[in-house]
Image (spheres, rainbow, N blue to C red):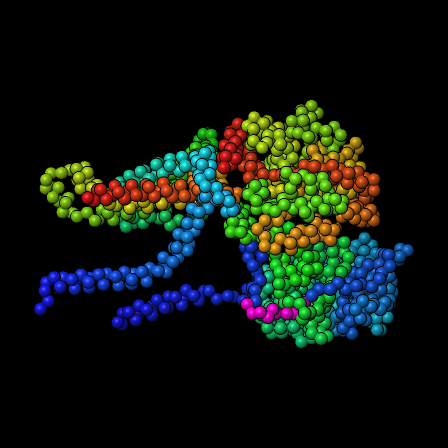
């Protein structure tokens, strides 16, 4: 009996122990590398849905004159939102400030302290205006007088009627950088309650400099990367050296008071920490980044998400976060200023709306193997317009490098179970297989009306029709443009003609690349020479590789990237459609070689192309066999349970709201966005200066309207998408390299490739 | 007084009762494990059998067309041939080699434990480490080719040629030799010494003792070692995949490769049919083994 009791007790212990691991951890934040079909929101089992959420509202900026731009937003002494503008008129500069008295109403004034001649001249660039913690206004600007760049700090005095220069001796001392000397390059500044200055000098990596109010250097603080500074009382808050959180440096005790863990994110677009801080009077710290606005109570250790960045502009890749203001009227409200790539400032207001559900009730899932900026932009835009829908964007590979097959298998598991994301970004996925097996729905009801309205570029969309149905549509595309003489462009339609040209003229055809780059670029352009629906032809493949070897020898291709110019060395060669046509082009101006292949992922790139062609006699440009590279091909999951919402989302991606924004991942697929880009190109007058490989300086203006129209006509003639079979191309790349490096001959290489390709095709 | 028959019946009933209650107890303790295996293995496999009669997305019933399709698929036939060739080469070789090793070790008096551990070590080496080591040795710029180059012999392409098969065979035998050797030793220790003594008295030599005493007594062990070696032979796919990728040289393109690739391209219907066919073949083989084993026992 005793034994029985002991046995039963042991079983109970076992069962309880195994159930302990089943509790839900509510503190974990959602991972964007979760399964594509995972329902991330927990449906409230109670009938009452929790209400209340912060919503975004765009703040109507004051009406500005033609050459006036907003460059800074701050909170003034009266806790009001104040924006500063800069106007360039008749070669003179004027600064104005606008204070928001009530929503939509701004009061203009002319801050005399900024218009007294120190800052408002053409040889000055204002970096920052701020209200210091000591209650005074400060401005940091860079003076370019005398061909040097010098940072100067001024303080508003006499109730902002005048300005006084702050004498910081450190700013007048040159620093030796390499062979030259420069004045400190102050990127950011903060003023503490006791009047001390904190400066971020661009020449002092990972350090913040603390100065007393009379300019005396006090100490250096070790920090992480580029900083958005903040201070509260005597503490300086900065990102830790390993970027894993924040440290609070007490300037009195000269020690780090505390550190807080936080995962700091970087913006791909702006290559900087996309993060700003703000403090409330009670010491509560707020951080605003791509994830949203998070709050940390004074002396607390737990971060609370106040505003979810996934549901608004904070997660938009096209916007950088400039400043965060917390106002505490009737509950916390936030103002966030954003800047875009052309430095335009946008202002958003976040208020708590108790009439909206705290979590959107509807949800769709979007899946892509790798991060796609256009999709990320669309997600933010769609959610801002549709408050009741959450778009859960899942990036399969996330920040991890790995074998894409593993991620595809995970996705396929969900698709087979009838789940999977509602919208799939098909780049890198077995698209043909999905279409063949009916995984994807027909998009004709979305695409055809857009074609009829003259929205979508029909030459792009028509390339994706199969039996009058369209299952995938690229959201962007890039165009490889070949620069060269007419003669060399005419021969660039096939590798055979290129080899004939090389043999006849003995000229160097193109720039030096690695073998891997050469093979990848030529595979993308000329794989039709040996590949057909039936498979790979052995004789034609042998001919292709032999031709490539001739081109490689002619251009002096190397095994490894010795110049440091190419983006990736060929240590682990891998065919990646996003890394095509990235070879050197600057030697073209020195006439080192006869062609330059330029990847156009925006219309503005054409300025560069025209400039290059004009700086060398007899040069023109053209597409290669009317080919383009489709980017961000989207498809609709046939098993989606939210088809209508998913279709709406696809429409947003292909609308001008998204296509107008330049996310630097390709040209827009709609005509109106291309036209807008052309208009802004024509407005932006300027000179582009480049140095050739040989050190010669070249400069050229922007392209003319007729030239841009010519290029746009070429875009309309594109008809052939570069449909890359990643598996076959990787087989060819991996097994052709030993031939190029002399480890085997072409027949051996071809035999291995054919054997593998045949196995793949037999499957 | 109870009659003898009644006593016998009581004993029988008690025995049946005890057997039933023991059976119930056993079931109770086995239940969690059975449940887990049912949920994660048996039920999914029943689903695989079901999927083999439907199209890829499980919408349309297609009967036996998936089976016809894979039996006519050249890549599948190639994979099956290579798998059979691999099994046919490795398993007999492994059994013979490890039997020899165990016989030698059985007689060994000095450093016996040390030698056992040495043979077992390869089994504990992680797959990734083995792959790194093999790449260091067999890569076109690896140690062996560098040595060959030093002696003015041209490079050998180990990974992308027929030699990859032999590397895989070597890997399998190297990894599993220790394990099989221990199993053989267990069988050898189970043979009564008195048989050998009696044989010695009768004037039997070593070969005769091996043939008439050792081998017959090891036959039950052969079945177990055979099955385990068979199962372990499929694990060598990990090394093959990590060294040579999704599409290796033809000589080592095996069943797991094609199933893996079918999964990526969403050809689940073919994968399911292939899995069912493979299962049937293995079942027949194992039943044959079992029959042979029983016949031998009898």
For the residue pair A678 and A258, the one nearer the viewer reads as: A678
Spot occupied by residue A175 in the image (x, y as percentages of width and height): 72, 57
Numbered disc total: 0
Q: Residue at x 33, y 39 (%)?
A: B91
**Residue A49 drawn in magenta:** yes
Given residues A194 and A661, the one toward you in this image is A661
Q: Position of residue A732 (x, y in %)?
A: 56, 35
Q: x, y percentage for residue A437?
A: 55, 43
Residue A42 visible in this rendered orientation of the protein = yes
Asked if residue A743 lies left or right of residue A246, the reply is: left
Q: Position of residue A395 (x, y in %)?
A: 59, 53
Residue at left offset 84%, top offset 59% = A68
> Magenta span covers which residues?
A45-54
Q: Measured along the vertical axis of the image, is residue B51 above or below residue A75? A: above
Quadrant hosting residue B19: bottom left
* Residue at the (34%, 36%) spot, across then down: B88
Which quadrant: the N terminus of chain A? Answer: bottom left
A82 up-or-down from A607: above or below: below
Secondary structure mostly seen in magenta is loop
Residue B165 in view of the camera = no
Q: Most extreme residue toward the top, as rendered?
A: A504
Look at 16% across and 47% down and name the residue there: B193
Q: Is residue A112 left or right of residue A170?
A: right
Q: Is residue A3 magenta?
A: no
Furthest toward the right, the residue is A90
């Amino acid at each position: 009996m005793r034994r029985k009791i002991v046995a039963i007790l042991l079983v109970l212990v076992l069962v309880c122990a195994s159930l302990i691991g089943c509790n839900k951890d509510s503190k974990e934040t959602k991972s964007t590398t979760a399964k594509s079909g995972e329902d991330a929101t927990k449906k409230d089992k109670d009938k009452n849905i929790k209400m209340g959420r912060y919503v975004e509202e765009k703040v109507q900026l004051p009406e500005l004159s033609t050459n006036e731009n907003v460059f800074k937003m701050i909170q003034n002494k009266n806790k009001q939102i104040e924006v500063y503008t800069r106007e360039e008129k008749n070669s003179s500069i004027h600064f104005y400030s606008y204070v928001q008295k009530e929503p939509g109403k701004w009061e203009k004034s002319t801050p005399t302290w900024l218009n007294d001649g120190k800052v408002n001249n053409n040889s000055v660039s204002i970096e920052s205006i701020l209200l210091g913690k000591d209650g005074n206004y400060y401005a940091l600007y860079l003076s370019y007088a005398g061909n040097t760049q010098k940072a100067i700090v001024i303080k508003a005095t006499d109730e902002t009627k005048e300005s006084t220069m702050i004498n910081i001796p450190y700013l007048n001392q040159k620093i030796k950088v390499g062979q030259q000397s420069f004045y400190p390059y102050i990127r950011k500044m903060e003023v503490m309650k006791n009047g001390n200055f904190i400066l971020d000098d661009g020449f002092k990596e990972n350090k913040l400099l603390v100065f007393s109010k009379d300019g005396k250097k006090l100490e250096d603080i070790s920090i992480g990367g580029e900083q958005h500074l903040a201070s509260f009382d005597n503490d300086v808050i900065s990102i830790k050296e390993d970027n894993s959180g924040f440290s609070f440096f007490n300037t009195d005790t000269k020690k780090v008071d505390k550190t807080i863990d936080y995962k700091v994110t970087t913006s791909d677009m702006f290559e900087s920490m996309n993060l700003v801080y703000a403090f409330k009077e009670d010491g509560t710290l707020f951080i605003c980044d791509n994830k949203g606005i998070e709050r940390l109570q004074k002396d607390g250790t737990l971060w609370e998400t106040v505003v979810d960045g996934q549901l608004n502009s904070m997660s938009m890749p096209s916007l950088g976060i400039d400043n965060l203001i917390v106002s505490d009227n009737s509950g916390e409200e936030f103002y966030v200023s954003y800047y875009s790539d052309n430095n335009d400032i946008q202002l958003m207001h976040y208020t708590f709306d108790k009439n909206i559900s705290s979590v959107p009730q509807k949800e769709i899932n979007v899946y892509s193997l790798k991060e796609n900026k256009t999709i990320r932009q669309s997600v933010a835009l769609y959610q801002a317009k549709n408050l009741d829908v959450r778009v859960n964007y899942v990036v399969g590979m996330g920040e991890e490098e790995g074998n894409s097959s593993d991620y595809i298998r995970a996705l396929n598991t969900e698709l087979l179970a009838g789940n999977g994301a509602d919208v799939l970004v098909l780049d890198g996925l077995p698209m043909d297989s999905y279409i063949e097996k009916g995984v994807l729905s027909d998009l004709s009801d979305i695409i055809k009306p857009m074609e009829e309205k003259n929205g979508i570029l029909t030459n792009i969309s028509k390339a994706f029709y199969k039996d009058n149905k369209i299952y995938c549509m690229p959201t962007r595309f890039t165009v490889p443009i070949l620069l060269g003489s007419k003669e060399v462009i005419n021969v660039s339609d096939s590798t055979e003609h290129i080899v004939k040209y090389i043999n006849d003229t003995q000229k160097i055809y193109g720039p030096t690349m690695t073998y891997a780059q050469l093979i990848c670029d030529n595979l993308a352009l000329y794989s039709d020479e040996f590949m057909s629906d039936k498979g790979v032809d052995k004789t034609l493949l042998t001919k292709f590789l032999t031709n490539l070897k001739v081109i490689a020898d002619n251009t002096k291709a190397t095994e490894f990237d010795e110049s440091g110019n190419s983006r990736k060395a060929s240590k682990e060669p891998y065919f990646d459609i996003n890394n095509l046509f990235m070879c050197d082009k600057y030697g073209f101006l020195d006439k080192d070689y006869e062609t330059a292949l330029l990847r156009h992922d925006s219309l503005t790139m054409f300025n560069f192309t025209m400039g290059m062609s004009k700086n060398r006699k007899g040069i023109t440009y053209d597409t290669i066999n009317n080919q383009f590279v489709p980017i961000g091909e989207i498809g609709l999951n046939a098993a989606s349970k939210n088809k209508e919402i998913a279709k709406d989302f696809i429409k947003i991606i292909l609308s001008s709201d998204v296509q107008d924004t330049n996310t630097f991942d390709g040209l827009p697929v709609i005509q109106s966005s291309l036209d807008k880009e052309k208009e802004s190109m024509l407005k932006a007058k300027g000179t582009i200066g480049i140095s050739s490989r040989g050190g010669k300086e070249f400069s050229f203006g922007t392209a003319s309207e007729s030239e841009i129209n010519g290029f746009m006509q070429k875009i309309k003639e594109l008809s052939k998408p570069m449909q890359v079979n990643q598996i076959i191309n990787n087989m060819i790349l991996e097994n052709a390299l030993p031939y190029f490096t002399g480890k085997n001959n072409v027949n051996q290489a071809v035999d291995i490739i054919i054997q593998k390709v045949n196995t793949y095709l037999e499957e | 007084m109870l009659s003898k028959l009644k006593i016998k019946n009581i004993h029988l009933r008690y025995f049946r009762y005890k057997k039933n209650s023991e059976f119930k107890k056993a079931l109770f303790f086995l239940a969690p494990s059975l449940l887990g295996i049912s949920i994660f293995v048996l039920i999914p496999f029943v689903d695989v059998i079901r999927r083999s009669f439907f199209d890829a997305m499980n919408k349309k019933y297609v009967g036996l067309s998936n089976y016809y399709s894979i039996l006519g698929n050249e890549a599948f036939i190639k994979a099956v041939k290579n798998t059979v060739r691999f099994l046919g080469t490795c398993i007999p070789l492994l059994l013979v080699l490890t039997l020899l090793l165990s016989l030698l070790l059985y007689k060994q008096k000095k450093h016996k434990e040390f030698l056992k551990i040495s043979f077992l070590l390869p089994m504990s080496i992680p797959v990734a480490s083995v792959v790194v080591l093999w790449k260091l040795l067999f890569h076109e710029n690896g140690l062996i080719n560098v040595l060959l180059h030093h002696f003015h012999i041209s490079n050998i392409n180990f990974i992308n040629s027929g030699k990859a098969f032999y590397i895989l065979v070597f890997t399998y035998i190297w990894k599993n030799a220790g394990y099989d050797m221990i199993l053989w030793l267990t069988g050898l220790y189970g043979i009564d010494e008195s048989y050998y003594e009696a044989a010695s008295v009768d004037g039997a030599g070593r070969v005769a003792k091996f043939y008439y005493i050792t081998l017959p007594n090891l036959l039950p062990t052969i079945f177990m070692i055979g099955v385990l070696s068979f199962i372990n032979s499929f694990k060598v796919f990990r090394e093959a995949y990590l060294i040579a990728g999704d599409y290796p040289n033809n000589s080592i393109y095996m069943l797991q490769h094609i199933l893996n690739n079918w999964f990526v391209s969403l050809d689940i219907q073919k994968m399911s049919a292939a899995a069912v066919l493979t299962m049937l073949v293995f079942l027949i083989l194992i039943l044959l083994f079992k029959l042979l084993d029983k016949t031998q026992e009898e």
